[in-house]
Amino acid sequence: MRANSFGLSGKVRGSAFLALGLALVAVLIGPVRAAPEAGQFLSNLSDRAIARMTEPDLSVAEKKRRFGALVDEGFDIPAIGKFVLGRYWRDTSPAEQQEFLATFKDMMVSRFLPVFDDYSGERLKVGIARPFAEGTRIVSVSSELAQAKGEPFKVDWRLLQQPDGGYKIVDIIAEGVSIAVTLRSEYTAALKNNNGNVAELMRILREKIAGG
């Protein structure tokens, strides 16, 4: 498993990143035991990914395109992007907001697509789904990621109910580390160092995407 972070400073490493990467790949291409409603979303996402990502002789470009489509389907990129930019989102023009969301999605694809090459059949067992907080449309779904050796990783999913009644992922908490909160911290630090320049943040992200 590659131990790359998918932020700026490399804080998300070790067991937390391992759990995150494996959990994401397991839900996309491995069998999932689904809990009612929100948990069923993870199972359905897995089914669609199996059909799309396991076809033989896919080119790298086609894998990237299909994985990007799965990210669009499975993750609420606008909600996550708005959260990770924090107060800087309000100071950004609509055009720049959309440019940032596209860059952010490209970063997700760049960091997680290589994990497929290292996947060795780990299975995700989805547990209880419950409301995350009163007055919100966020549901928390617990899960465990089995390993060949050692204790399973604990992974919690935060799913936001969409206007159509479906769900999308807005955060993954791997081994107690919130990916959305970590990214917000890293991006905010980068923005503070660059006078709140979101264009400069996007440049940094694009450099990391290009560097693999």
Image: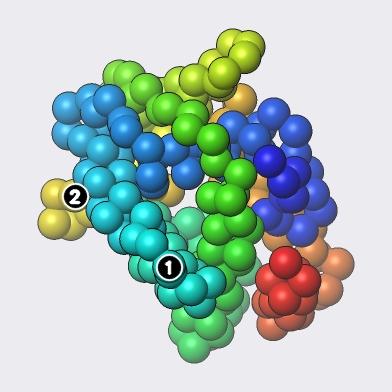
Residue 88 image-quadrant placement: bottom right
Quarter in which the C terminus is drawn: bottom right
Q: Is residue 67 above or below residue 154?
A: below
Q: Is residue 106 above or below residue 73?
A: below
Numbered disc 1: secondary structure: loop
Residue type highlighted by circle 1: Asp
User: What percent of the width, then of the height, locates residue 13?
Assistant: 75, 39
User: What percent of the width, then of the height, locates residue 149?
Assistant: 62, 14
Q: Which residue is mark 1?
A: 57
52 and 178: which is toward the camera: 52
- Of badges 1 and 2, the one in the foreground is 1
Q: Say whether marks 1 and 2 touch (CB < 8 Å).
A: no
> Residue, x 31% and y 31% (percent of image)?
32
Residue 70 image-quadrant placement: bottom left
> Residue, x 81% and y 53% (percent of image)?
9
Residue, far bottom: 95
User: What percent of the width, then of the height, locates residue 209?
Assistant: 69, 71
> Residue, x 61% and y 25% (percent of image)?
175
Residue type highlighted by circle 2: Gly
Question: CA separation, marks 1 and 2?
Answer: 32 Å
194 and 24: which is toward the camera: 24
Q: Is residue 201 visible?
A: no
Q: Is residue 140 above or below residue 212?
A: above
Q: Is residue 106 above or below residue 131?
A: below
Residue, far right: 193
Question: Which numbered disc covers residue 166?
Answer: 2
Numbered disc 2: secondary structure: loop
Residue 114 image-quadrant placement: bottom right
Name which of mark 1 and mark 2 comes first in the sequence.
1
